[in-house]
Image: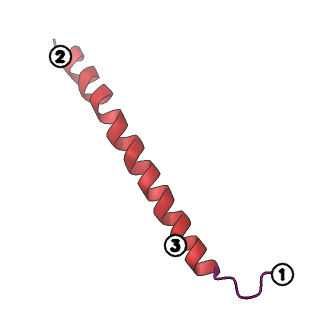
Amino acid sequence: MVEGHDFEEDDCKHYRMNYQTGLVFFIAGLPAFIACLVLQFL
């Protein structure tokens, strides 16, 4: 049923997708974080 399937390639692909998703969320949250810092020190 899973003969010939490369599990290491799947793991590598999932790791890459998780890394990219985390990076996108981090970049998306930066403007709100910076705005909070700016508003706190006004």
Residue 1, numbered label: 1
11 horizontally vs 24: left or right:
right
Camera-near label (1 vs 2) is: 1
Where are the magenta residues, as a range? 1-6
The residue most toward the left is 42
Mark 1 vs mark 3, CA separation in Å: 21 Å
Q: Are marks 1 and 2 in contact (CB under 8 Å)?
A: no
Q: Amino acid at mark 1?
A: Met
Looking at the rendered structure, the secondary structure element under dot 1 is loop
**Which three-letter amino acid code belongs to the residue tagged 2?**
Phe
Q: Please, is residue 4 above or below residue 12 in the view?
A: below
Residue 40 is labelled as none
Residue on which the image places disc 2: 41
Report how far apart the C-alphas of labels 1 and 2 lie in the structure: 60 Å
Given residues 22 and 1, the one toward you in this image is: 1
Question: Which residue is pictured at 71% across the width and 88% down the height?
Answer: 4
Of residue 33 and residue 13, the one placed in the foreground of this image is 13
Quarter of the picture holding the N terminus: bottom right
The secondary element bearing badge 3 is classed as helix
